[in-house]
């Protein structure tokens, strides 16, 4: 509990800093959202009236504290483009993003964990070199290029999966799964490469420990030694990496969702940036950063459960 309290207290200045940076960075976006919304033919009076309506005629500190005050009341403002509450728009977009992020992590783990373990156990074998080559390919290939190649291959040349779009899971589970496959593979492949390399490295270190050699000497089978003795210890750095990768997922969805027209937080953010919709951009960035902080907190707690010495040293 002491460790949890310390970590929660440490989040306060982090979240405050995030709110300040989010607000200031959005203000640096070139262009006037009011002019963008009304068009170049709008009169100065109409522009001034709408600017005053959204509080954009106030000095930046006044705008920030007004935005912060509304934030504490659970109000992120209204979209300049659509007039909808930003919170409602984020609520509609977060579920598709969570589905995509979860599917990408599953794809990553399904590929990376078995490949990493096999690569370590079969060190310097052809399987090890092949795994390393695939990992290097996964790390080197940009997500947008892989996404486009998947569309050309599995949607255009061989129309197995749809090239874009989103079907709610409760409306048609099979159609939803088909729309999810390509973006999940696109996003999960780069994650799998890094996780595989970390798993291999951690397993190689653990397999050389005395207690693992003792387990072999006792006559335990490969499955018991590798899964029950070695992999549990090797899991700790992998868990830490997964926490970091969740942040990469949140960043990666911006490109992947745009390529596949996936209606999540990433696509919403890109559309809002092009429309200079400040409230939506601020809300989306703030939500993404807050989720990233919470994921890091969850990662630290899991790490502390796996290794109590981490919590005691805090």
Image (spheres, rainbow, N blue to C red):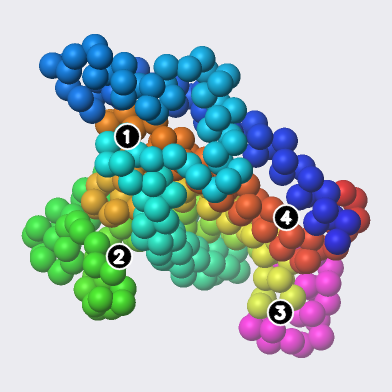
Of label 2 and label 4, which has the lower sequence position? 2
Residue 198 location (% of width, % of height): 60, 54
Q: Quadrant of residue 177?
A: bottom left
Q: Which residue is mark 4?
A: 300
Select label 3 or label 4 by which is in front.
Answer: 4
Which structural element holds mark 2? Answer: helix
Q: Residue at 18% of width from left, 66% of height from top?
A: 161
C-alpha separation, residue under disc 3 versus residue under disc 4: 22 Å
Select label 3 or label 1 by which is in front.
Answer: 1
State the mark number for residue 228: 3
Select label 3 or label 2 by which is in front.
Answer: 2
C-alpha separation, residue under disc 2 versus residue under disc 4: 30 Å
172 to 64, vertically: above or below = below
Of label 1 and label 2, which has the lower sequence position? 1
Q: Viewer-proximal residue, 100 or 80?
A: 80
Q: Viewer-proximal residue, 6 or 201?
A: 6
Residue 125 location (% of width, % of height): 51, 63
Of label 3 and label 4, which has the lower sequence position? 3
Q: Viewer-proximal residue, 224 or 161?
A: 161
Q: Main secondary structure of the magenta part?
A: helix
Q: Which residue is mark 2?
A: 180
Q: Is residue 218 magenta?
A: yes
Of label 3 and label 2, which has the lower sequence position? 2
In this picture, which residue range is highlighted in magenta? 206-225
Which structural element holds mark 3? Answer: helix
Q: Which residue is mark 1?
A: 80
Q: Which residue is outermost to the right?
A: 312
Q: Viewer-proximal residue, 278 or 274?
A: 278
């Amino acid at each position: 509990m002491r460790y949890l309290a310390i970590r929660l207290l440490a989040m306060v200045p982090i979240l405050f800093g995030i709110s300040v940076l989010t607000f200031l960075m959005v203000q640096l976006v070139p262009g006037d959202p009011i002019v963008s919304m009304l068009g170049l033919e709008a009169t100065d009076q109409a522009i001034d009236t709408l600017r005053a309506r959204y509080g954009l005629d106030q000095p930046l500190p006044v705008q920030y504290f007004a935005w912060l005050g509304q934030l504490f009341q659970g109000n992120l403002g209204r979209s300049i483009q659509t007039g909808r509450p930003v919170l409602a728009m984020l609520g509609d977009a977060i579920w598709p993003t969570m589905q995509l992020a979860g599917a990408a992590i599953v794809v990553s783990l399904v590929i990376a964990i078995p490949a990493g373990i096999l690569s370590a156990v079969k060190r310097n074998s052809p399987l090890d070199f092949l795994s390393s080559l695939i990992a290097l390919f996964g790390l080197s290939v940009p997500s947008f290029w892989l996404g486009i190649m998947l569309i050309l291959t599995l949607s255009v040349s061989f129309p197995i999966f749809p090239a874009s779009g989103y079907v709610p899971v409760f409306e048609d589970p099979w159609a939803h799964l088909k729309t999810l496959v390509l973006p999940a593979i696109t996003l999960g492949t780069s994650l799998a490469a890094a996780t595989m390399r970390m798993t291999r490295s951690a397993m190689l270190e653990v397999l050389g420990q005395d207690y693992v050699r003792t387990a072999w000497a006792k006559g335990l089978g490969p499955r018991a030694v590798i899964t029950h003795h070695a992999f549990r210890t090797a899991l700790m750095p992998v868990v830490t990496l997964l926490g970091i990768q969740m942040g990469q997922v949140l960043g990666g969805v911006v490109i992947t969702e745009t390529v596949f027209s996936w209606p999540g937080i990433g696509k919403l953010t890109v559309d809002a940036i092009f429309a200079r919709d400040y409230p939506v951009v601020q809300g989306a960035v703030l939500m993404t950063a807050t989720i990233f902080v919470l994921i890091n907190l969850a990662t630290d707690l899991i790490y502390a459960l796996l290794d109590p010495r981490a919590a005691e040293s805090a």
